[in-house]
Image (cartoon, helix red, strand yellow):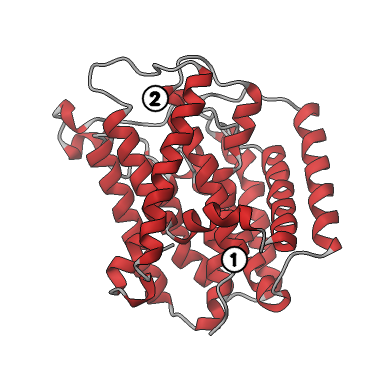
Amino acid sequence: MRKRDNAIDILRGMAIFTMVASNLTPYALADEAPEWFRFYGTFAAPLFVFLAGMMIGLGRKKQHGFGYYLIRGLALMGVGAWLDAYVWGLFPFLSMDVLYLIGLAMPLCYLFGRLPAGPRYALALAVFALMPQLQAWSPYRHSPDNFTIASGIAAAAVFAQADLAQSWLIDGWFPVFPWLGVAFAGTLAGEIRLRSRSFDGVKTLALGIASLAAGVFWWLDKPVERFARGGYPDLFYPPTLSFFCVAAGVVLLLFYIVDNTAENPLYAPFKLYGKCSLLMYILHTVVIGEYFWPEGGEMGQFAFGAFLQVYLIFMLGLLAVAWVVSLLKPKNLPAPIRFFIGS
């Protein structure tokens, strides 16, 4: 058995840590998020999706079949549907949320990984190349379709009104074009990591710096209006090629740093988060929906300083849960439980 990859757990934990800040912002922050804080939470999503694809590439050594990834993908989509319906009171599947995206990507990444090398790289690039073409063909909407279950509208009427193709492919929360390309890129990186076992070399550093520098130049040269969609401060609404160029640089540099310092004890909290990332995602969503999104109440009660304190206390609570889970020795638990508390 291959030793557990500490760097992946750490990076997944970092994604969770910054993602919670971003997802808490619309419901707890009274003012607009400072610009630096928008960057702080923005790269959690591409890192999270990239790592999900990477696990498919790394899983080739375990020889899991298509059915394994299909079942896990459907289970993730089921969790996403439950969160939409129970926590947010929304009809599920009307927009491409992150768990829907990863659930869809899992079996597709498996099939993608079975293609010859040339077509794999061409297909990953094509997903990104099609994004601006689709956005030009059908303009990116400020807000995706949302219909509440409490409205009493019949499900058939809701799905008839919603533009599912637009939301799933072009302008949902995490549309297939280009986010499936991030998962495909992760699968390619996972296959490379199987051979190299680490991204701690100078090639990773050079490629990360080059991608980051090119992306920043492109970002500044061709600025676009970036929505704070629904109050979420992330800078990928709308997604652009310049954003993903910057994100690729950030992800590569994070891998380089963590692979070179993975044994640093300061990473211990992130490792705990990362080992039960799905549980962390579910818990933080439920807590935000139940305690920071009061029915008929006022959202965004905290100034930025108080917001940061609330955020850190929240993360300490999640860390305590992650620590308890680590004591349970998840490898010895039944598979369905491992799915929910594992990663």
Residue 302 higher or lower than 61, as above or below: above
Q: Residues within 10 Å of mark 2 (few under 14, many from 20)?
A: many
User: Residue 213: which quarter of the image?
Assistant: top right
SS for dot 1 = helix
Query: Do we see residue 299 in this rendering?
Result: yes
Q: Which residue is mark 2?
A: 27
The answer for how far apart the CA atoms under marks 2 and 1 are is 33 Å
**Left or right: 69 with respect to 139?**
left
Residue 260 pos. (x, y %): 75, 62
Residue 88 pos. (x, y %): 28, 34
Residue 231 higher or lower than 317, as above or below: above
Quadrant of the drawing holding the C terminus: bottom left
Task: Name the kind of residue labelled 1 in the image.
Answer: Asn
Task: Name the kind of residue labelled 2 in the image.
Answer: Tyr
Q: Which residue is mark 1?
A: 6
Q: In front: 338, or 190?
A: 338
**Left or right: 147 with respect to 6?**
left
Q: Earlier in the sequence, mark 2 or mark 1?
A: 1
Residue drawn 82% across the image and 56% down it: 205
